[in-house]
């Protein structure tokens, strides 16, 4: 019965109904148009803000720490196992559609991160908290709608995703080193618990230290493999573009599979529109002190995650002489590809990379769901203790669960979150445009932007003491 319900909902969202594909494409195009192609025309400015992003007030979380926390959650199994799933089910053309959804998703990511900042609150510890549930409740004035989103978030980031990430880590370690999944799952759970018990600030500090090193090493490995196989690169790129538009032998059916799997796994990887990253965005004290600053910084996260890191995995797989069966394959396809390039060292490299990538996601996912405890007045010792215990228990369960069972639950949670969030940010478009206009006006006058809510027309109300 449970399996039937999960399959029916996923079929509507991701399968034949393809509701989410249309919703995400609409949101990406909507915000790209309304924000005047901000992800392309303001590309240089987006990078310029990165220079001062590590500065913030003492005891606050910087824009760079918030970016790394967002990347902690984004950069996970989607970059290694998810890309492999997309290619195995959708062919090489799926990668093109991952790029498309990422470029459009940059505008969506900007919009939702700006809202996360505008409607952020302070919790019982005096830390900033925010996200879709908060901008739905304060901006749209709908607590019921906010609770629906929070419930989807707890189902996804609070429980299912941690199980899925643990599942991928234990499978990779079992394949590379024959470590029993229950033992590696237990160690991962204990290590994650030691970090998340320190709260959001401890998670942000962990992210700031680990993410840059993790990304640089992975990109470097992909660049080396590309150089090793340079003569094959033009043919690989040609195959990606031809497959994306069904111009190979398989025709239109292959094009449909490429679009579906590319967008599905692209969303799962960069999370633009899913409503997850606004939680990290809201936690920051940006410099310049304006919500749009964090919108640009988090837009970078989508670019780094999909255009850079997912492309690295795709290159590794497509340049390898490995059989892509057409059946669902996860992390082991990536490991097989790395082995083809680097012999046995490839298996160890991917096992280490997926362990680190997925582990950082586990830590950040906890922070996202924990941000919503304040919404239910559960941001106290008892509330956090119960949530932490449930979260770590799901991690242990995930160590031995089947891949398909875990991915199906993850897809349904992400899909429901996305539907609720996209509806909300579309309805809050006037606020996004107004806040962005305020930022640009101040820059045009040659002054450092500073957000004062009394000078900008926003929907609903912001929490007192945050921006006034």
Image (tube, rainbow, N blue to C red):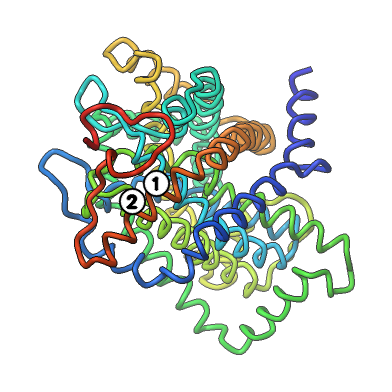
Q: Quadrant of the N terminus?
A: top right
Where is residue 196 drawn, in percent x and y? Answer: 31, 31
Relative to 450, 220 lies left or right: right
Does 183 sit above or below residue 347? above
C-alpha gap between disc 2 and disc 1 = 7 Å
First reached walking from the N terminus: tag 2 or tag 1:
1
As helix, strand or loop, the secondary structure at mark 2 comes to helix
Q: Are marks 2 and 1 in contact (CB under 8 Å)?
A: yes
Where is residue 11 drawn, in percent x and y? Answer: 79, 36
Does 104 sit above or below residue 393? below
Instruction: Determine which residue is flagged by label 1.
Output: 114
Relative to 95, 364 lies left or right: left
Between 259 and 160, the one nearer to me in the picture: 259
Instruction: Determine which residue is flagged by label 2.
Output: 294
Relative to 187, 203 lies left or right: left
Looking at the image, can residue 132 be seen? yes
Between 22 and 305, the one nearer to me in the picture: 22
As helix, strand or loop, the secondary structure at mark 1 comes to helix
Between 288 and 458, the one nearer to me in the picture: 458
Residue visible at 57% across and 83% down in the picture? 229
Between 183 and 456, the one nearer to me in the picture: 456
């Amino acid at each position: 019965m449970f399996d039937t319900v999960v399959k029916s909902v996923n079929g509507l969202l991701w399968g034949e109904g393809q509701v989410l594909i249309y919703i995400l494409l609409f949101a990406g195009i909507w915000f790209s148009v309304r924000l005047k192609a901000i992800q392309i025309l303001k590309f240089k400015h987006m990078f310029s803000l990165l220079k001062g992003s590590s500065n913030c007030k003492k005891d606050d979380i910087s824009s760079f720490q918030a970016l790394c926390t967002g990347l902690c959650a984004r950069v996970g199994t989607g970059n290694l196992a998810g890309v492999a799933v997309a290619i195995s089910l959708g062919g090489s053309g799926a990668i093109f559609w991952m790029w498309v959804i990422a470029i459009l998703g940059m505008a969506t990511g900007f919009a939702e991160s700006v809202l996360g900042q505008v409607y952020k609150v302070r919790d019982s510890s005096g830390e900033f908290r925010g996200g879709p549930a908060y901008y739905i409740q304060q901006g749209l004035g709908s607590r019921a709608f906010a609770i629906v989103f929070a419930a989807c978030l707890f189902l996804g980031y609070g429980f299912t995703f941690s199980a899925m990430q643990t599942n991928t880590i234990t499978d990779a370690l079992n394949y590379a080193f024959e470590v029993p999944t229950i033992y590696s799952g237990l160690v991962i759970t204990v290590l994650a618990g030691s970090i998340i018990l320190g709260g959001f600030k401890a998670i942000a500090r962990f992210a700031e230290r680990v993410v840059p090193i993790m990304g640089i090493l992975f990109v470097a490995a992909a660049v080396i493999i590309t150089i090793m196989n340079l003569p094959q690169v033009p043919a690989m790129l040609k195959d990606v573009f031809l497959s994306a538009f069904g111009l190979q032998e398989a025709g239109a059916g292959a094009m449909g599979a490429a679009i579906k799997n590319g967008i599905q796994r692209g969303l799962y990887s960069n999370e633009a529109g899913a409503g997850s990253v606004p939680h990290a965005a809201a936690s920051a004290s940006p410099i310049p002190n304006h919500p749009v600053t964090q919108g640009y910084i988090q837009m970078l996260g989508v670019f780094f995650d999909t255009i850079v890191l997912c492309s690295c995995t795709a290159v590794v797989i497509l340049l390898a002489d490995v059989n892509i069966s057409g059946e669902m394959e996860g992390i082991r396809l990536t490991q097989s590809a790395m082995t083809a390039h680097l012999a046995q060292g490839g298996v160890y490299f991917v096992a280490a990379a997926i362990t680190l990538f997925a582990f950082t996601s586990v830590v950040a996912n906890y922070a996202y769901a924990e941000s919503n405890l304040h919404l239910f007045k559960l941001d106290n010792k008892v509330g956090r203790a119960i949530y932490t215990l449930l979260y770590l228990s799901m991690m242990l369960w995930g160590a031995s669960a089947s891949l398909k069972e875990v991915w199906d639950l993850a897809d349904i949670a992400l899909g429901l979150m996305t539907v609720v969030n996209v509806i909300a940010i579309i309805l809050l478009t006037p606020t996004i445009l107004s806040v962005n206009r305020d930022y640009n006006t101040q820059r045009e006058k040659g002054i450092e932007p500073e957000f004062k809510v009394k000078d900008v027309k926003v929907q609903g109300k912001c929490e007192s003491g945050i921006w006034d």
